Amino acid sequence: MTSDERTLKKRTAALSVLSNTALVIGKLAVGMLTGTVSIISEGIHSGVDLLAAAIAWMAVRASSLPPDETHDYGHGKIETVSAAVESILIVVAALAIFHEAWQKFLVPQTMPEDGLYLAIGVMSASSLVNAIVSQRLFAVGKQTGSAALQADGMHLRADVWTSAGVLAGLVLMKLTGWAWIDPLVACLVAAGILRVGIMMCRKSYDELVDTSLSQIEENRIGRIILDNPGVLGYHHLRTRVVGTTTVLDFHLEVDKSLPVYKAHAISDAVEFSLHAKYGSCDPTIHIEPR
């Protein structure tokens, strides 16, 4: 990864921290002022996003460190651990929102009209800001292969939809005067947050236990290997992901009559083609005569 990409990752993670800080303060202030549990739930959600963004920012900085004596494969797994922590926080936040919404169901409260307009305004601003920042996080995350930035972008994209749902519920409350809509919307928000958290838990788990790439990805790697002149075949391909790098090893089959230096040259060509066509990867190749 280039120094420009590392700088871009750090700046994008910092942008997420700043935007989430502003949204948390705004949502919690308005939610407590108006007593709106759906906005308080959104404030809790943004608070989790803020903590997640801070974790992602620290993870991006740490994972950018080069390999050292105690980390031969670098520090890429730090981003995966970061994503795992974020997913657990999301699940906890969803359960907290369910609890608050249930309390509101038991004791419904009406909202003053001025407070309702204020609540609608803050949720409109939240949807717009999160839409812009999440798009930026996803774009930079895909460009640099950052799991932490993509996880953070997933948080904010979920926040866009939940903010829009809360906004729709507030408008419906204004039109109907039904106080129970507020905790109902909060429950729907919590359900969406819980779904995202579970999905992220599964993805982080797969990376932490070194789950192999999909069969489609391994077939793509195989085609790149076989496209090189002098390669007679390959077998025992193993793959896993370490941060932003795909680690793979395999046995490369070459003509048994070739001298060592020619077999090694074929191996070098295969490694070069993998770097050129597949992206960030760290291949280990065992040459076998055939």
Image: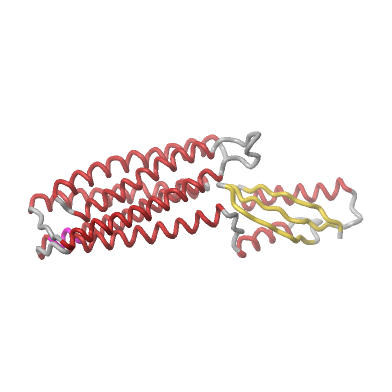
Residue 145 belongs to the span the image colors magenta: no
Residue 274 appears left or right of 265: left
Residue 177 sits above or below residue 59 on the image: below
Give the vertical position of 237 relative to 126 (above or below). below
Viewer-closest of 152 and 141:
152
Coloring scheme used: secondary structure
Q: Residue at x 44, y 39 (%)?
A: 57
Range shown magenta:
169-173
Vertical comparison of 138 with 54: above or below: below
- Residue at image location 64% in from the left, 52% down from the top: 277
**Vertical side of 68 occupied by 113: above or below:** below
- Most foreground residue, 34 or 213: 34
Image quarter hosting the N terminus: top right
* Residue found at the far right of this picture: 257
Q: Quadrant of residue 253?
A: bottom right
Q: In the rendered picture of this protein, how many numbered marks are placed on residues? A: 0
Q: Position of residue 171 (x, y in %)?
A: 16, 60
Q: Nearer the viewer, residue 89 or 20?
A: 89
Please provide percent x and percent y for residue 259.
90, 49
The C terminus sits in image quarter: bottom right
In terms of image quadrants, where is residue 176?
bottom left
Taking the image as shown, residue 3 lies to the left or right of residue 52, namely right
Question: Residue 289 location in percent, x, y?
Answer: 86, 57
Q: Could you say which quadrant of the image residue 189 lies in?
A: bottom left
Image coordinates of residue 6 in percent, x first then y, are 51, 37
Image point (44%, 43%), residue name: 56
Residue most extreme to the left: 113
Q: Is residue 288 left or right of residue 185?
A: right
| Main SS of residues in magenta | helix
